[in-house]
Each structure stands twice: as C-alpha cells, then as structure tokens.
C-alpha cells in the first residue's frame, strides 16, 4: 500500500513538479486525504476511515470527525501538528502542500481573478461527521475576526445521501433564535454558563435534516449542526464561538466561546453578544432565506448524466462559494466545462477525469493514498474536463466546490421551488 508518509516532501522547486503533474494529468492535481480531529466531539464513523485510526492523533487530541478537501487553511486546534488542515498534492513519489503550490504557481492554478484579489485559494470544503449534535455556535464576521488577525467564516451544508445511510443520534439542526427572542434572554444564558445547561436551545428552533438537501449559513448566525454527515463548502477560516455550555452531558468550556475574540473582551457579555447577527438570527423566515435543495445545471438523458447545483446563493450580497454534484450513469462519458478552479471528491463509483483515475474507497487507513480527491485548475476547468464512468453497473457521483464570484449564473436562494413546481 502506498502511503503519504512514504513519499518525499518537496519544499523547493515546486513549480517544476507542478508543471510535470499538470502535463501528465491534463491540468489536475491528485490530493491525499486530510484528516482533522476535534477534541470536544465524537466521530460519527461515516468518513470511511478505518476504526483503528479514529484516534490516530492520540486520544488527548480527540477523534477524527472531519476530512478537509483542497484545503490551504490551517485547522485552529490546540496542540495541532504544524500542517494540520493542509491538503497535500501527490505526484509520483513526492508530495507538497496545495498551499505551497498555489503560492508558487498562483494564477496558473486558481486563475488570475482569484489570485490577484486574494493571493491564495480562499475557500475549502470538508466532510463533517459526528455521532450527535455539536454546540449551538456561530462563526465570526470578517469585521469581528479581524480583531484577532483572522478571517470571517460563512459556510454551507449539503448532506450527501451516499454518506448518510444512517442518521446517527440527532439528525436535526437548531438554527438561529426564535423570533421575539431578546438580547437579555441570550445574555442570561451566558450568565448561567457554569450552572450546567445554560438553556440556549430553549430560545432556538430545530429543523429535521434531509439527505440530498442543504443550508447556506452566514457569519454571526447561531447553529447547532446535527448528526448527518455533511459536505461543507466554506470560507478559508476556522473561527468559531460556542454559545452552548452543555451538549449531551459533555461540558463546553468558556474558552471555546471566546477563543476568537480579543482577550480583554473574554468576559464582556455585551461585546460577545455584539458579534451575533441579531436580525439574521431572529428572522421569522429563516428557513426560506437559508434552505437549499438541488437545482439542475444540465441534464442530457440520452447521455445519462446530470449536473446539479447543491450550494448556491449569496451571503450579505456576495457569492463566496458554490458547489455542484455531477452524476454519470454506467458507461457514460461527457465533457464538463466550468468557470473556475475547483476541489473535487468522489462519493460513489469509479472512473476517470482527464488522465486521472477516480475511485470511491470502501475503507481508508490514516496514511493511505486514495483516488477520490482532485484539484482542478482553472485552465483545465475552462477547457473542459472529460469525465468517464468505467463501471457498467454503478453511477459515478462527484462533488466539486468553487471559489468566490466564479459562477454568476448560479441560482438564487429559493430557486428549487421554481424547478419543483415546473
């Protein structure tokens, strides 16, 4: 078995290695699995990671409940490894981080528009997989994250059916606050932090999670993700603030409430409350403004493939990320053109994209290399990627996510209603 650890790590002359990899693959970079643990959560065991490797970082670091895709973002974990959260590109017998490749090759990989504006790949996605719910929390806005030298984090959810044959313990997500909730009521929850359950969920509403659907969640919005395995395109940041003190009997320390706030504000309740998007949280039409269902991009029944938008819409008027799901029937071959670079993962089946093989693994060891993740450069995406399903019995299904402002033709929130009624 070829493993990540058996490869030589390249830190210089990356450009020449990237050029060789792109020429051989047809504009693509193979990525190795990137595993991330969380010390305060319980793994949901649907990432296909071998059960013996769930605590590969050590019991003190917590179980592995996330796999990050095409990531150039460091995981904000205490006692993390230096490269935790960073995706590695693999070519022949060497490896190098996608972050270093982007820094060396810039527009050649992500396009001139993203490179000139951000000087990095500014987004990433992940599988997020837990046995039960996680604390009611929010992610800071750009304005508030900058106070501690970080970036804000809007995010999105899609619940791939292939990873959700079981819903685990709580397939419901609390979102926002009930209309009419007052700031004083939320403040009281913070005041009661050390008394046990601070009661923040009494002020919120839970929505049942449905495989094949999703949500778009802006910064400052409270949410307590439930126990479906979730595909999460999001901004390239790992800031958050937990507002719930007790989850399934597990203590949530105050430090996770204030970890991305200025230290001098750690006990300033008015400041902590000010980081919430209040109007967004108490929106009486919360679901209408955030809920997603797939919308077809193209469907050619004679060729038996379908491309669908699974993440779309804008956050505060900006398109920050989008995602699509491509399904090819057995034996199908098609060329798909996109507007920009993307990270891709396979959730079902086997086949090829340009000159790289694709295969959805059944079980993955911690250091094992797989054939289910690829970074597609902007030039390759625009020229058109040839996808082929090499199976004669099973669909090939891939998810791919894009950076900001790449897909101006993407639907608006609520578009699925129009297609459902057509």
Image (tube, rainbow, N blue to C red):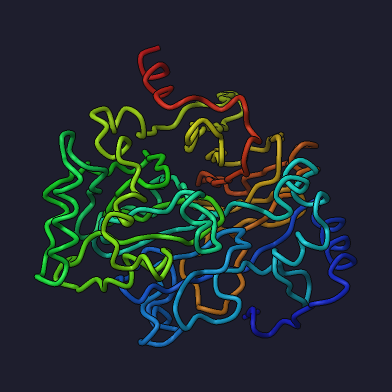
Q: Is residue 405 above or below residue 415?
A: below
Task: From the viewer's side, name the closer residue of 10 and 325.
Answer: 10
Q: Quadrant of the C terminus?
A: top left
Q: Quadrant of residue 228?
A: bottom left
Determine whether, in the image, residue 114 is placed left or right of residue 320.
Answer: right
For residue 326, say whether it is visible: no
In the rendered view, would you say 240 is above or below 259? Answer: above
Tell me if residue 78 comes above or below residue 244 in the rendering: below
Q: Position of residue 95 (x, y in %)?
A: 73, 74
- Residue at image coords 82%, 63%: 104
The N terminus: image quadrant: bottom right
Rendered position, 99 above or below 59: above
User: 82 or 130, which is in the foreground?
Assistant: 82
The residue furthest top is 422
> At which x and y percent is residue 98?
70, 64
Query: What residue is at 84 percent from the left and 69 percent from the top?
Result: 14
Q: Position of residue 224 (x, y in %)?
A: 27, 53
């Amino acid at each position: 078995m070829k493993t990540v650890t058996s490869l030589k790590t390249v830190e210089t002359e990356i450009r020449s290695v990237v050029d060789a990899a792109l020429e051989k693959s047809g504009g693509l970079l193979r990525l190795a699995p990137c595993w991330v643990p969380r010390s305060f959560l319980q793994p949901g065991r649907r990432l296909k990671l071998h059960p013996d490797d769930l605590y590969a970082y050590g019991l003190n670091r917590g179980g592995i409940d996330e796999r990050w895709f095409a990531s150039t973002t460091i995981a904000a974990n205490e006692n993390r490894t230096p490269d935790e959260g960073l995706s590695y590109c693999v070519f022949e017998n060497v490896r190098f981080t996608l972050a270093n490749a982007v820094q060396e090759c810039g527009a050649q990989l992500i396009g001139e528009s993203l490179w000139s504006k951000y000087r990095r790949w500014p987004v990433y996605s992940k599988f997020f997989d837990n046995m039960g719910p996680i604390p009611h929390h929010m992610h800071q806005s750009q304005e508030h994250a900058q106070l501690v030298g970080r970036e804000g984090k809007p995010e999105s959810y899609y619940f791939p059916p292939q990873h959700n044959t079981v819903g685990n313990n709580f397939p419901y997500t609390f979102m926002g606050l009930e209309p009419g909730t007052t700031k004083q009521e939320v403040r009281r929850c913070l005041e009661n932090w050390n008394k046990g359950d601070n009661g923040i969920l009494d002020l919120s509403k839970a929505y049942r999670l449905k495989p094949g659907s999703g949500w778009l969640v802006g910064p400052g919005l409270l949410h307590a993700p439930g126990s479906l395995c979730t595909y999460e395109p999001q901004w390239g940041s790992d800031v958050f603030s937990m507002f719930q003190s007790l989850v399934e009997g597990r203590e949530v320390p105050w430090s996770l409430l204030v970890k991305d706030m200025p230290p001098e504000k750690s006990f300033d309740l008015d400041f902590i409350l000010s980081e919430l998007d209040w109007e967004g949280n108490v929106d009486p039409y919360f679901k209408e403004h955030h809920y997603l269902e797939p919308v077809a991009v193209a469907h050619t029944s004679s060729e038996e493939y379908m491309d669908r938008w699974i993440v779309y819409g804008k956050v505060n008027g900006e398109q920050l990320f989008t995602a699509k799901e491509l399904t090819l029937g057995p034996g199908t071959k098609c060329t798909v053109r996109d507007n920009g670079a993307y990270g891709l993962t396979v959730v079902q089946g086997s086949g090829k994209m340009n000159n790289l093989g694709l295969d959805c693994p059944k079980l993955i060891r911690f250091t094992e290399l797989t054939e289910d993740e690829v970074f597609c450069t902007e030039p390759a995406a625009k020229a058109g990627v040839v996808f082929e399903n090499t199976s004669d019995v099973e669909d090939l299904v891939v998810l791919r996510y894009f950076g900001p402002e790449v897909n101006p033709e993407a639907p608006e929130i609520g578009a699925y209603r129009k297609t459902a009624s057509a």
